């Protein structure tokens, strides 16, 4: 019982922190859209649906295995990247799918190990949550879990594709804004996975 309480408390704290730092959906002054607002709205719906499903499963779980704790570790690591990235960006942060007319080039802190720590953190969180729900949902919903997992898979695929596409678009935009300074940054810092030296350019 104590382990379950600890797990559920940790999951709740991580969701609150992630929502505060990673899901700031307010439109800031001086921003433009990479995509039409309808696609960004769909991204928000998918994200909130995935978070809601994770919370329901987390609070309904009856027993925990090692895979669940590994999932939680991935969520902790992902949330830490999201928080560090958001704090490093400060005033130049925008929600995925938006860009600033006058952007800033942040290369310090967590941006010294990956050019996309926010996206990397979100992908880690999605990986951890997916692993957890794949393990627990069949136990909680033995009859209907294929339908629920199929719906969540569709939302996850869209969210991952949207974020990847935005990361690539942002890189191109920053290269156009900062030229050689950004190209030098590209040459020494990996696109997504920390500490893996850049090879062929993704952009």
Image: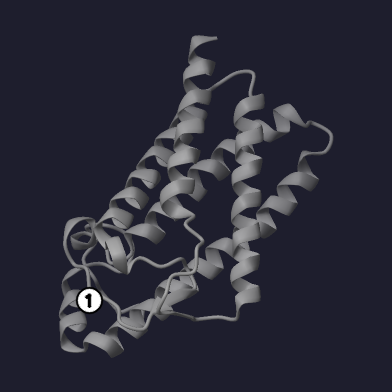
Q: Residue at x 48, y 36 (%)?
A: 71
Q: Residues within 10 Å of mark 1 (few under 14, many from 20)?
A: many
Q: How many marks?
A: 1
Most extreme residue toward the right is: 143
Q: Residue at x 44, y 70 (%)?
A: 28
Q: Residue at x 74, y 53 (%)?
A: 151
Nearer to the camera, 11 or 203: 11
Asked if 41 appears above or below 14 in the picture, the reply is below
Most extreme residue toward the top is: 1
Quadrant in the rendering for residue 90? bottom left
Quadrant in the rendering for residue 77? top left
Asked if 121 appears above or below 190 in the picture, the reply is above
Name the spot of residue 178 as percent of width and height, x first: 22, 85
Quadrant in the rendering for residue 52? top right
Asked if 202 appears above or below 78 in the picture, the reply is below
Q: The N terminus lies in which quarter of the figure?
A: top right
Nearer to the camera, 67 or 50: 50
Residue named by callout 1: 186
Most extreme residue toward the front is: 29
Asked if 177 appears above or below 130 in the picture, the reply is below
Label 1: state its secondary structure.
Answer: helix
Nearer to the camera, 15 or 119: 15
Name the spot of residue 109 as percent of width and height, x first: 18, 56
Here the colouring is one colour
Name the spot of residue 3 as percent of width and height, x first: 49, 15
Q: The C terminus lies in which quarter of the figure?
A: bottom left
Q: Residue at x 66, y 34 (%)?
A: 56
Name the spot of residue 15 as percent of width and height, x first: 50, 39
**Direction from residue 117 to residue 72 in the image, left or right:** right
């Amino acid at each position: 019982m104590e382990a379950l309480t600890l797990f559920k408390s940790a999951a709740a704290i991580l969701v609150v922190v992630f929502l505060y730092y990673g899901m700031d959906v307010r439109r800031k002054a001086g921003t433009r859209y990479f995509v039409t607002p309808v696609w960004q709205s769909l991204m928000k719906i998918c994200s909130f649906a995935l978070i809601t499903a994770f919370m329901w499963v987390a609070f309904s779980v009856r027993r925990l295995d090692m895979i669940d704790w590994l999932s939680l570790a991935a969520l902790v690591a992902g949330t830490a990247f999201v928080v560090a990235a958001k704090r490093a960006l400060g005033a130049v942060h925008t929600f995925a799918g938006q860009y600033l007319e006058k952007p800033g080039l942040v290369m310090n802190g967590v941006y010294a190990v990956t050019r996309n720590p926010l996206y990397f953190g979100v992908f880690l969180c999605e990986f951890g949550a997916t692993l957890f729900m794949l393990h627990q949902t069949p136990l909680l919903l033995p009859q209907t879990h294929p339908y629920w997992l199929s719906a969540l898979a569709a939302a996850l695929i869209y969210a991952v594709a949207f974020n990847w596409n935005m990361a690539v678009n942002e890189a191109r935009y920053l290269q156009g804004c900062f030229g050689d300074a950004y190209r030098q940054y590209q040459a020494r810092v990996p696109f997504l996975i920390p500490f893996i030296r850049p090879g062929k350019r993704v952009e």
